[in-house]
Each structure stands twice: as structure tokens, then as C-alpha cells.
Image (cartoon, rainbow, N blue to C red):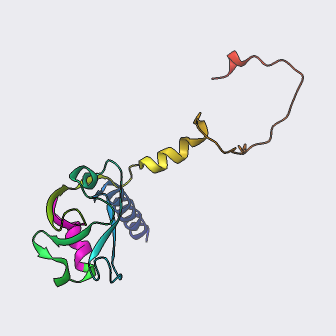
């Protein structure tokens, strides 16, 4: 019985460590399949581009239509396959054919950016340190998770470490 419990605990610890050390790769875009008759009906349209991401550096813009992924027309594949093709396993770059009003079709090579699964994002970091910003325009309330008392006795802060 003890061996079984120990085996389960070791397996759980291994799987937890494995999940945290996995790389998460992204191009830096979000998209939706367009339902609009006026712009990209049935094709993936870029809804946002993350600043300084590989997609932005490659020249991808919001509202671009993804016409093809690695030479395969997006109208010929399912929405699930589009997601898989935008993040292919074992491949570090994706060739996108995109179109917009300025360019009916152009090809851009977007390299994936990979980070550890347990890495903190810039957005999480900014949120964590936003209370220290000199540019903060809203007031924030700081709550101490302990009881404080005010005393008239002098305190020598040199003793604290």
C-alpha cells in the first residue's frame, strides 16, 4: 500500500514538473473566422497583434486576412486545422499569405517565440508592479494581511533584517 501511494506521489511530482517545464510557443496573433460578407467571409481574420511579437516584427497587422498557411488555402481546411497549422509541432516558423486593402496578397515568414510554461508574462509583471508606477492615475488600496498597532514607543529600525 505504501509503495502504491509513493508511486502515485512520484508520478504526480514528475508530471507536475514536466508540465511546468514545457515550452509555450506563439506567433503573437489572435484571429477569428470572419462572418462578415464585407471582409474575409469564412477566412481567419487577425483580431489583434501582440506588440513586439514575431508577427508584428514580420509585418502582420490587425484586420489582415490569412489567405494561406504554408501554401495551403485556409478555405480548404477546417477551423481546428487552422489552429494546428498556426502552431505546428517541430517547426519554428510559419509562412503566412495575408491580404488587406493595401496588398491583396503578400507572404510573410513568422518565427515562433517559445518560452517556458511557468514563465511570467509581461502583462502579469506589469500588473504586479503597477502599484509602484509614478504614472498611476487611479488610487489603489493597500491591505496588510496582518494586524497593525500604533505605539508611542520609539522603534529602532536598525534591528530589523
- Give the residue at x 75% y 43%: 146
In the displayed structure, would residue 29 be above or below residue 69?
Answer: above
Image coordinates for residue 140, horizontal then vertical, percent: 69, 45
Relative vertical location of residue 25 with respect to residue 35 in this rendering, above or below: above
Is 145 covered by the magenta stretch? no
Q: How many marks?
A: 0
**Residue 10's image quarter?**
bottom left
The reply to whether residue 92 is in sight is: no
Quarter of the picture containing the C terminus is top right
- The image shows residue 149, relative to residue 156, as above or below, that is below
Q: Residue at x 24, y 66 (%)?
A: 100
Is residue 135 found left or right of 9 in the rendered image?
Answer: right
Residue 84 colored in magenta in the image? yes
Name the one closer to the observer, 147 or 72: 72
Q: Residue at x 23, y 83 (%)?
A: 78
Magenta range is 81-100
Residue in front for this viewpoint, 125 or 47: 47
Horizontal side, residue 106 vs residue 160: left or right: left
Residue 40 falls in image quadrant: bottom left
Amino acid at each position: 500500500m505504501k509503495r502504491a501511494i509513493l508511486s502515485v506521489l512520484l508520478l504526480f511530482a514528475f508530471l507536475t514538473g514536466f508540465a511546468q517545464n514545457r515550452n509555450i510557443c506563439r506567433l503573437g496573433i489572435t484571429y477569428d473566422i470572419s462572418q462578415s460578407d464585407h471582409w474575409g467571409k469564412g477566412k481567419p481574420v487577425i483580431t489583434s497583434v501582440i506588440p513586439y511579437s514575431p508577427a508584428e516584427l514580420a509585418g502582420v497587422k490587425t484586420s489582415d486576412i490569412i489567405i494561406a498557411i504554408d501554401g495551403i488555402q485556409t478555405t480548404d481546411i477546417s477551423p481546428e486545422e487552422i489552429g494546428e497549422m498556426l502552431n505546428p509541432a517541430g517547426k519554428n516558423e510559419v509562412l503566412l499569405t495575408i491580404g488587406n486593402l493595401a496588398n491583396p496578397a503578400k507572404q510573410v515568414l513568422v518565427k515562433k517565440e517559445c518560452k517556458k510554461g511557468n514563465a511570467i508574462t509581461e502583462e502579469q509583471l506589469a500588473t504586479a508592479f503597477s502599484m509602484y508606477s509614478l504614472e498611476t492615475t487611479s488610487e489603489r488600496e493597500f491591505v496588510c494581511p496582518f494586524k497593525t498597532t500604533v505605539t508611542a514607543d520609539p522603534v529602532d529600525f536598525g534591528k530589523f533584517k
